[in-house]
Amino acid sequence: MTEKPPQQTPYTRHVFICTGESCDRERNGRWLYRRLTNLLGDLGHYENPQRVKRGTTECLGICAGGPIMVVYPEGIWYHHLNEEKLARIVEEHLRNGHPVEDYIFHRLTDE
């Protein structure tokens, strides 16, 4: 018997916030991850084709400058997140498609 593969609902971006203490000794990434749910609002709803998926990871391999967040598919990396920065990233980058240059420390591509 062949197992039926799971179904994926549409989404436009996937963000990961590092919650490990190597780069974030105070562990603020966990709190920011929970806060992200409210900031995303309708962008977090499963039925929204513009949905932004979110996840946590214990390590993004940087080990400094945390909390760190990476946004895919663009591969844009943000550093030293706090609530104010996260709110700006959600509004400008995730809602309006304009990465917040002030907080970027790495890009997957040079575009």
Image (cartoon, rainbow, N blue to C red):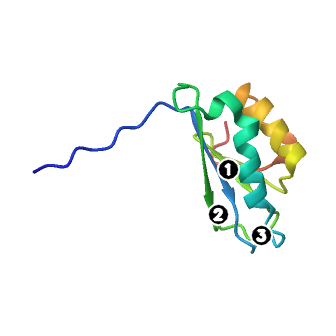
The total of numbered circles placed on residues is: 3
- Distance of mark 1 from mark 3, alpha carbons? 14 Å
For label 3, the crowd category at 10 Å Cα-Cα, with few meaning under 14, some 14 to 19 and many 20 or more, is: many
- Along the horizontal axis of the image, is 40 left or right of 64? left
Give the labeled residue for mark 2.
60
- Distance of mark 1 from mark 2, alpha carbons? 9 Å
Amino acid at dot 2: Leu
Q: Nearer the viewer, residue 9 or 111?
A: 9
Residue occupying image coordinates x 76% and y 37%: 39
Earlier residue among tags 2 and 3: 3
The disc at residue 23 is 3
Residue 97 x %, y %: 71, 27
- Along the horizontal axis of the image, is 93 left or right of 108? right
The answer to whether marks 2 and 3 mark residues whose Cβ atoms lie closer than 8 Å is yes
- Distance of mark 2 from mark 3, alpha carbons? 9 Å
Which secondary structure, mark 2? loop
- Along the horizontal axis of the image, is 61 left or right of 49? right
The answer to whether marks 1 and 2 mark residues whose Cβ atoms lie closer than 8 Å is yes
Earlier residue among tags 1 and 3: 3
- Quick check: can you spot residue 100? no
The disc at residue 70 is 1
- Residue 43 image-quadrant placement: top right
Residue 4 x %, y %: 22, 44
Residue occupying image coordinates x 64% and y 67%: 59
Q: Quadrant of the C terminus?
A: top right
For label 1, the crowd category at 10 Å Cα-Cα, with few meaning under 14, some 14 to 19 and many 20 or more, is: many
Residue 20 x %, y %: 70, 69
Amino acid at dot 1: Val
Q: Nearer the viewer, residue 107 or 33?
A: 33
